[in-house]
Image (spheres, helix red, strand yellow):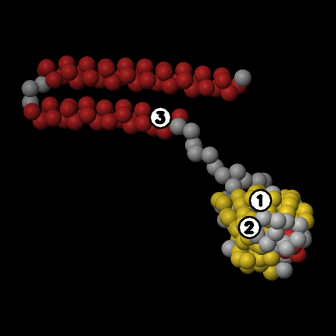
């Protein structure tokens, strides 16, 4: 309710400003016009025309200033109270694969803040025990994918893996950790490996 009243107050004040400013401009224009009739010297006329043009530029500048004041500011990136980065993790993977098949698992890390997250790692539990690593966009040491520093925006990491040579259901919990975190981010994955062609 208070926001609506403040908006109405701003609109009302702006309307009053426009009316008063227009009245002043019209009065000045009328007075200058009357002075033009009385004054015949060329130098004085040039000075009066320059004054009138200056007043018009002043009016335009005032309206431009008020338009900029009413324009909403662009949204700032979300920050937490402690000035720390906040990460989110999205994992893309197939839910069903055949034995001995190459698959891609993608990790999308989003940092909506202006702060850099340091020493970001993705940790698996049992995924690499069943799926063999073919290639990776980031270094893999043991069961950890080392991402490094994540700045504001989106960072994508992908793994090319080969599925197991026997049918099984592989379930794992993927954990995203970084130096400034309050608590780790976890996401579960489940991939069913079937036999046959």
Left or right: where does residue 157 sit relative to residue 192? left
For marks 1 and 2 on the same chain, the one whose residue lies earlier in the sequence: 1
* Circle 1 crowding by C-alpha within 10 Å: few under 14, some 14–19, many from 20: few
- Identify whether 189 is placed above or below 28: below
Q: CA distance from mark 1 to mark 2?
A: 8 Å
Q: Can you tell which mark lies on residue 116?
A: none
Q: In the rendered image, which quarter is residue 37 located in? A: top left
Q: Earlier in the sequence, mark 1 or mark 3?
A: 3
Q: Is residue 197 visible?
A: yes
What residue is shown with label 1?
Answer: 94
Nearer to me, 80 or 96: 96
Task: Using the image, tell me which numbered label, if any, was put on residue 67.
Answer: 3
- As drawn, is 2 to the left or to the right of 73? right
- Of 93 and 51, nearer the camera is 93
Q: Which residue is mark 2?
A: 103
Identify the residue shown where x is 89% and y is 67%.
167
Q: CA distance from mark 1 to mark 3?
A: 52 Å
Q: Secondary structure at mark 3?
A: helix
Residue 59 percent across, percent down from the top left: 36, 32
Q: Is residue 84 visible?
A: no
């Amino acid at each position: 309710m208070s926001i609506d009243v403040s908006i109405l107050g701003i609109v009302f004040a702006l309307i009053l400003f426009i009316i008063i400013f227009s009245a002043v401009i019209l009065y000045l224009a009328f007075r200058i016009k009357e002075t033009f009739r009385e004054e015949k010297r060329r130098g004085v006329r040039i000075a009066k025309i320059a004054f009138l043009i200056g007043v018009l530029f002043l009016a335009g500048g005032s309206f431009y200033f008020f338009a900029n004041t009413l324009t909403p500011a662009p949204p700032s990136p979300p920050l937490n109270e402690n000035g720390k980065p906040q990460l989110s993790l999205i994992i893309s993977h197939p839910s069903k694969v055949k034995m001995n098949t190459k698959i891609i698992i993608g990790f999308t890390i989003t940092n909506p803040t202006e702060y850099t997250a340091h020493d970001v790692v993705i940790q698996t539990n049992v995924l690499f025990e069943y799926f063999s690593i073919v290639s990776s966009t980031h270094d893999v040491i043991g069961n950890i994918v080392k991402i490094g520093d994540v700045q504001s925006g989106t960072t994508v990491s992908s793994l090319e893996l080969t599925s197991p040579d026997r049918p099984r259901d592989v379930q794992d919990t993927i954990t995203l950790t970084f130096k400034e975190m309050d608590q780790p981010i976890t996401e579960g994955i489940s991939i069913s490996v079937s036999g046959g062609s």
